[in-house]
Amino acid sequence: MNIFETLAFYFENQFVWNAVIVGVLIAFCSSLLGVTLVLKRFSFIGDGLSHVAFGAIAIASVLKLTNNMPLVLVVTVLCAVLLLRTGQNTKIKGDAAVAMISVGALAIGYLLMNVFSASSNISGDVCSTLFGSTSILTLTETDVWMSAILALIVLAAFIFFYNKIFAVTFDESFSKTTGTHVELYNLLIAVIIALVIVFAMNLVGSLLISALVIFPALSAMRVFKSFKSVTICSVVISVVCSLSGILISILAGTPVGSTIVAVDIVVFFAFFLAGKIGGRS
């Protein structure tokens, strides 16, 4: 059986389509605002919030909630707001604030999963949560619809507030002088990223989500310079890498999240070399 016959065989199953659709939508959402996060040096927020989401999942497990999504969503969004406020308005600035919250959430989450273990396979549960499930059977049609709704929200917010996001990204001081509510748009960006992280955890795991945000943006920046071009290229790279990673994981039997990130890394180096050859990096 050749590669195409193998893929055709797998794509007869609905769960494979679910994984592909969710993967593409999550990649689209994470990369759309990835350029803004990298340029604003907010990429650390994705990493910090992913640790927070892990801690929230541990709490949901202790409470024996059948659906942990509402709790994880609320906790992650609240921490996104807290990180933004803490980083701007107190003596605990940016990187220190995210380090405190992310490391604390990760440690407490792991502690809770050990003390109040609901499963005999604690290490398996932790690895699945941190690095993504080794099986794409976990994604359901509900995940597909929720990812589609999230993608529409992110796309609508980006298009509607494009000029404001562009201004806030490159010059916050000037934006403030022109009457733009900088804090509001920073908050909007942080909340959207929190939503993306929660929905992406089933696909790539909490520790690998930041790669979906950072690598496509950095790859696009190696070749293109304008904000619009970099954003479009970043989205294309992210979607292609996500789709390729899922297909490779199906054929090779590798973990989906890790495979997607590995493809992202390869593409980054390819764009890095292209930028060097073209004299843009």
Image: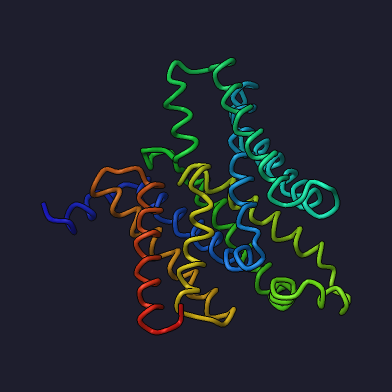
What residue lies at 44% left-to-right and 24% top-to-bottom?
123
Q: Give left or right: position of 147 versus 86.
A: left
Is residue 67 visible in the rendered image? The answer is no
Q: Is residue 121 above or below residue 126?
A: above
Compared with 9, 273 (above or below) is below
- Identify the residue shown where x is 34% and y is 69%: 270
Q: Nearer the viewer, residue 149 or 131?
A: 131
Residue 168 position (above or below residue 244): below
- Can you give x and y, in whole percent of width and height, for residue 191 in the image? 70, 54
Residue at 48%, 29% in the rendered image: 126
Residue at left offset 69%, top offset 39%: 101
- Left/right placement of residue 136 relative to residue 177 reads left
Q: Is residue 244 left or right of residue 237?
A: left
Q: Quadrant of residue 174?
A: bottom right
Give the side of residue 72 with respect to residue 173, left or right. left
Residue 268: x and y, percent?
A: 40, 65
Which residue of the protein is positioned furthest toward the left in this rendering? Answer: 1
> Which of the colour schemes (rainbow, by chain, secondary structure, one colour) is used?
rainbow
The answer to whether one can see residue 233 in this image is yes
In depth, the one of 203 and 148 nearer the eye is 203
- The image shows residue 265 at horizontal and vertical percentages of 39, 59
Q: Hey, which quadrant is residue 223 in on the image?
A: bottom left
Tell me residue 247's x, y (percent).
Answer: 30, 54
Callout count: 0
- The residue nearer to you, when weighing 21 against 194, is 194
